[in-house]
Image (cartoon, rainbow, N blue to C red):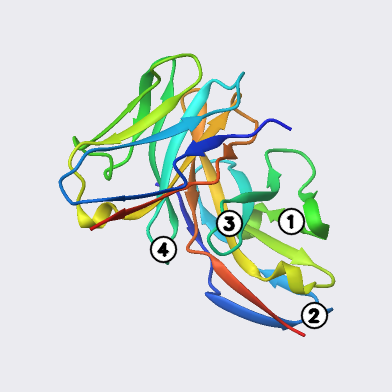
Amino acid sequence: AQSVTQPDIHITVSEGASLELRCNYSYGATPYLFWYVQSPGQGLQLLLKYFSGDTLVQGIKGFEAEFKRSQSSFNLRKPSVHWSDAAEYFCAVGARGGSNYKLTFGKGTLLTVNP
Amino acid sequence: EPEVTQTPSHQVTQMGQEVILRCVPISNHLYFYWYRQILGQKVEFLVSFYNNEISEKSEIFDDQFSVERPDGSNFTLKIRSTKLEDSAMYFCASLLRDGQTQYFGPGTRLLVL
């Protein structure tokens, strides 16, 4: 069965600093990979996704992520964090079954941004 | 931009009562999902639905749960006899086809007392 590990439960960075959130997955084939962001009490907003092709993917709000098959990783990066980026970030793997896929989420990383 | 909508945004119910959570997926999408997130925990898959039948369900999705697409637009999740542990945020999602993005609704926060 597929699984997602986000090793960092909570990360604090200063505004303007760079950010990397780690994500490792376990899946028997090439997965679909996603990063979602959730602000308190809100729904899930898709930041970026990888289905195939270029392993470096660009997303919204200046985020990017790189799929590394050899490391089973899909880390999220941003060169300069803004205070509005404070939220919880979820990595997810899409496990294919039949004609569609279901998402398996990691436990999330809570990002705090200091002024 | 098309979006998934969910009603109600919040629902409070008594243990043992039936609740129906409603979702309107994006109009031309073919696959529909329910996920839930217990407070402070990760989002968990409950069920997927395609062509008017369940495609896959998780261990959480027991006989107390059911899903239905009663008309061409709504997708519902029914919990027949709610338990305290059913308190969670329930997200609906829809998908056009494989290889595309699942779009999530804003969620329904269910509180069982």
- Are circles 1 and 3 on residues that touch, CB within 8 Å? no
Asked if marks 2 and 4 fall on the same chain, the answer is no
x, y percent for residue A104: 47, 48
Residue at position x 72%, y 68% in the image: A85
Q: Which mark is residue A91?
A: 3
Q: Amino acid at mark 2?
A: Glu
Report crowding for label 3: few under 14, some 14 to 19, many 20 or more residues within 10 A (C-alpha): many
Q: Chain of mark 4?
A: B
Q: Which mark is residue A2?
A: none
Q: Which mark is residue B41?
A: 4
Q: Which residue is mark 1?
A: A66
Cα separation between marks 4 and 3:
13 Å
- Are circles 2 and 4 on residues that touch, CB within 8 Å? no
Q: Which residue is mark 2?
A: A15
Asked if marks 1 and 3 fall on the same chain, the answer is yes
- Of A33 and B60, the residue lying toward us: B60
x, y percent for residue B37: 41, 54
Q: Amino acid at mark 3?
A: Cys
- Name the secondary structure under disc 3: strand
Q: Report the mark closest to the observer, 4 or 3.
A: 4
